[in-house]
Image (cartoon, rainbow, N blue to C red):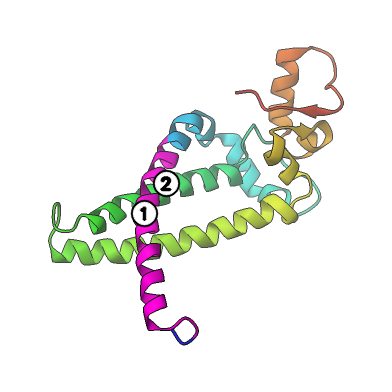
Amino acid sequence: MPVLGEQTFADWSQWVKYAHNYLSFPFTHGVVVILLMWAASNIPTRLDVEWLKEGGGLIGRKHPPAPRFNAGQKMIYWIVIIGGTAVAATGYLLMFPFYLTDIAGMQLAQMVHGTVAVLFVAVMIAHAYIGTIGMEGAFEGMWDGTVDVNWAKQHHSAWLAEQTAKTQPNPPPQGRMAPAE
């Protein structure tokens, strides 16, 4: 308020609240789409347990074998699905007050909404760091949907072996590969 002034701050706050409420609908839609698109690929397996035991390759020099999505990516996926669902559900309770709950439920929804949203943002910031400057080659894979074969060998060797077996019985190709859908 000291910088903007009382009225400008009040106007700005009102528009941000409108944006927050209306953007909840595409956010919720996105969570549902992500759930439907990638749920089958993000079910934890024994390979994920081994990946976690070895610290995902962050500890030591060896990267454990991983399928299309490693255990870390699967954890982010489920954080998005569970956290996104919690934020959406509590947000709708707050947007439409007292339709489904009483004052105690509204207070609980407020606490859950705020807490999960802050934790969600913190995890997404860490995820953005790892996916950009924290891991060489990761950003390129997100940018165009392909990864270098050597990067795939190092980070997703089980997936590379599976893709190679599907396309040819010979050694893996050189260049870039797109993940199979």
Image-based side of 141 in relation to 15, left or right? right
The percent position of residue 115, horizontal first and vertical second, equals: 39, 65
The percent position of residue 104, horizontal first and vertical second, equals: 16, 66
Question: Residues at badges 1 and 2 in contact (C-beta under 8 Å)?
Answer: yes
* Dot 2 amino acid type: Phe
**Disc nearest the viewer among 1 and 2:** 2
Query: Mark 2 falls on what kind of element?
Result: helix
Say which residue appears at 45% left-offset and 64% top-offset: 118
The percent position of residue 70, horizontal first and vertical second, equals: 63, 40
The percent position of residue 99, horizontal first and vertical second, equals: 13, 53
Dividing the picture into quadrants, the one containing residue 125 is bottom right
Q: Which residue is mark 1?
A: 87
Image-based side of 26 in relation to 107, left or right? right
Dividing the picture into quadrants, the one containing residue 129 is bottom right
Image-based side of 172 in relation to 155, left or right? right
Q: Which residues are magenta?
A: 3-32
**In the rendered structure, which disc, 1 or 2, sits on the residue that comes first in sequence?**
2
| Quadrant for the N terminus in the image | bottom left
